[in-house]
Structure formats: C-alpha cells, structure tokens
C-alpha cells in the first residue's frame, strides 16, 4: 500500500504503462481497408447465419442482404435514420 501512495504523491515514481491520450469523437480515424474487409466478412457470415436460422425457425424462405459496410460518425448515423425508428440489438 505504501508503494501505491508514494506513486500518487508529487515527486513519487511514475506509474508504468501507457498514458491516456485525448480522443476527438467528432473526427474519424479511418479504418484500414484490411480491417474493413474483415468486418465485411464477419457481417456476410452473420447475414448467412441469420437467414438460415430464421428460415428454419419460420419454415419459410427468408432473404437477408448486407447493403453496405461503411464508417460513419455517430451524428451521420443518426441523421440517416428516419423518424420514428426502432433499433434492436440481436445478441
């Protein structure tokens, strides 16, 4: 415990590890194309599994299509939603 308090006092030893850096949520850091491809593959797999599971559960053909994978700010996402909108988390 004494070591923790010594680190917290002025002139004490600096804490090891990375320092926090400020982040501006209004400016997007672009996702690299390789990661965007990986995200698209994950979503394609989810779409196939969702269509298969729903078709089996409802015993009818269900078509599910992935429209796009793109990076948006939260404000751009909200602006693209019509009113009223209902968002559901599947999990």
Image (tube, rainbow, N blue to C red):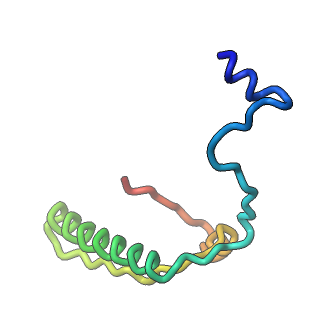
Quarter-wise, where is residue 73 in the image? Answer: bottom right
x and y percent of residue 64 in the render?
31, 77
Above or below for 25 versus 65: above
Answer with left or right where residue 5 lies relative to residue 70: right
Residue reaching furthest to the top: 2
Answer with left or right where residue 66 lies relative to residue 79: left
Identify the residue at horizontal 38%, vertical 75% (top origin). 38
x and y percent of residue 88 in the render?
46, 58
In the image, 56 versus 42, the foreground residue is 42
Quarter-wise, where is residue 67 in the image? Answer: bottom left
Above or below for 7 versus 41: above
Identify the residue at horizontal 74%, vertical 28% (top origin). 7
x and y percent of residue 36 in the render?
46, 78
Above or below for 23 versus 37: above
x and y percent of residue 34 in the render?
44, 80
Answer with left or right where residue 87 lies relative to residue 19: left
In the image, 38 versus 90, the foreground residue is 38
Identify the residue at horizontal 72%, vertical 72% (top origin). 27
In the image, 74 versus 62, the foreground residue is 74
Residue reaching furthest to the right: 10
Q: How many numbered discs sit on the rendered protein? A: 0
Identify the residue at horizontal 73%, vertical 21% (top origin). 5
Q: Quadrant of the N terminus?
A: top right
């Amino acid at each position: 415990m004494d070591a923790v308090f010594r680190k917290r006092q002025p002139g004490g030893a600096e804490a090891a590890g990375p320092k926090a850096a400020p982040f501006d949520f209004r400016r997007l850091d672009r996702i690299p194309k390789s990661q965007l491809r990986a995200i698209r593959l994950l979503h394609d797999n989810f779409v196939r599994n969702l269509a298969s599971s729903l078709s089996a559960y409802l015993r009818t053909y269900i078509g599910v299509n992935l429209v796009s994978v793109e990076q948006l700010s939260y404000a751009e996402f909200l602006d693209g939603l019509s009113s009223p909108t209902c968002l559901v988390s599947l999990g």
